[in-house]
């Protein structure tokens, strides 16, 4: 069990939102992890943000990871082992780090998203999610329904693919012909 996190609060959240929560992890983690159904995530966030005694009103971070890639399309560079694909699980996991400014406690919410599926944008709840969701879109290709400005934020608009996916080729680079001249400190550099 997590040190310093009230077990009663984990059970309260689990009981109160049992229809939205798929599972809860409390072992070997610094904060309780709630796996929430994608279809219920907005409702869940709106509620735990304002419910008295919970008040997880601060979105500390939002990211994702490629948890279940299609192993047949991964190039073997000899860098390590990739777990075999698990049918039925979503490919990606969205991770939301939440903090309560009232109780000074953290929780982590995870949502599974399939390849090509959309997940609801949390920008109506937390404006800070805007750029974080754009980064996840850029790096993983996860689309957020209802996002006010979903477009690339780190890579060139002409970039093909999403480099944080496990099946993205490590040794791949992209050159854009006709790019604007690169300028640095007022000096033109060779292309």
Image (cartoon, helix red, strand yellow):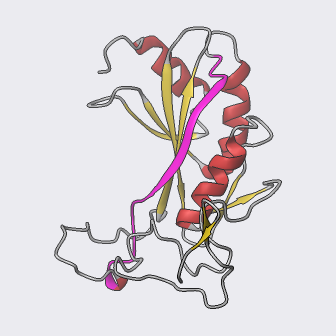
7, above or below 123, in the image: above
What residue sits 45% from the left and 65% below the top? 164
Against 105, is 163 above or below? below
Res. 52 image quadrant: top right
Give percent across and percent down for residue 103. 56, 8
With respect to residue 82, does 11 lie above or below?
above
Image quarter of residue 159: bottom right
Question: Residue 108's x, y, as percent?
Answer: 48, 33
- Residue 23 quadrant: top left
Task: Locate the N terminus and report the quarter of the image it occupies.
Answer: top left
Given residues 36 and 18, the one toward you in this image is 36
Residue 113 percent coordinates (x, y): 55, 60
Q: Who's the residue at 49% across and 27% down the image?
A: 107
Q: Outermost residue, front direction?
A: 187
Q: Is residue 23 magenta?
A: no
Q: Nearer the viewer, residue 180 or 89?
A: 180
Report the magenta residues as a range: 55-72
Which residue does the image show at 53% across and 65% down from the upper left? 140
Left or right: residue 144 compared with residue 99: right
Camera-side residue of 40 and 91 = 91
Looking at the picture, tell me which residue is in the foreground, 79 or 53.
Answer: 79
Q: Is residue 68 magenta?
A: yes
Image coordinates of residue 178 in percent, x first then y, are 67, 89
Left or right side of 106 for 5: left
């Amino acid at each position: 069990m997590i040190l310093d996190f009230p077990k009663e609060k984990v059970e309260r959240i689990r009981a109160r939102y049992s229809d939205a929560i798929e599972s809860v992890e409390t072992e070997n983690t610094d904060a309780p992890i709630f796996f929430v159904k994608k279809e219920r995530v907005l409702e869940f966030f709106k509620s735990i943000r304002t419910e008295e005694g919970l008040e997880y009103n601060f979105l500390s971070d939002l990211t994702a990871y490629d948890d279940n890639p299609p192993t047949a399309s991964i190039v073997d560079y000899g860098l390590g082992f990739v777990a075999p694909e698990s049918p039925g699980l979503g490919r990606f996991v969205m991770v939301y780090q939440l903090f309560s400014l009232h109780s000074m406690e953290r929780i982590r919410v995870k949502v599974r998203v399939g390849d090509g599926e959309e997940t609801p944008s949390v920008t109506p709840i937390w404006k800070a999610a805007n750029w974080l969701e754009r980064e996840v879109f850029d790096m993983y290709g996860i689309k957020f329904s209802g996002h006010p400005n979903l477009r690339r934020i780190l890579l060139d608009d002409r970039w093909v693919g999403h480099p944080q996916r496990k099946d993205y080729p490590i040794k791949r680079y992209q050159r854009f012909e006709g790019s604007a001249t690169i300028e640095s400190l007022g000096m033109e550099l060779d292309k």
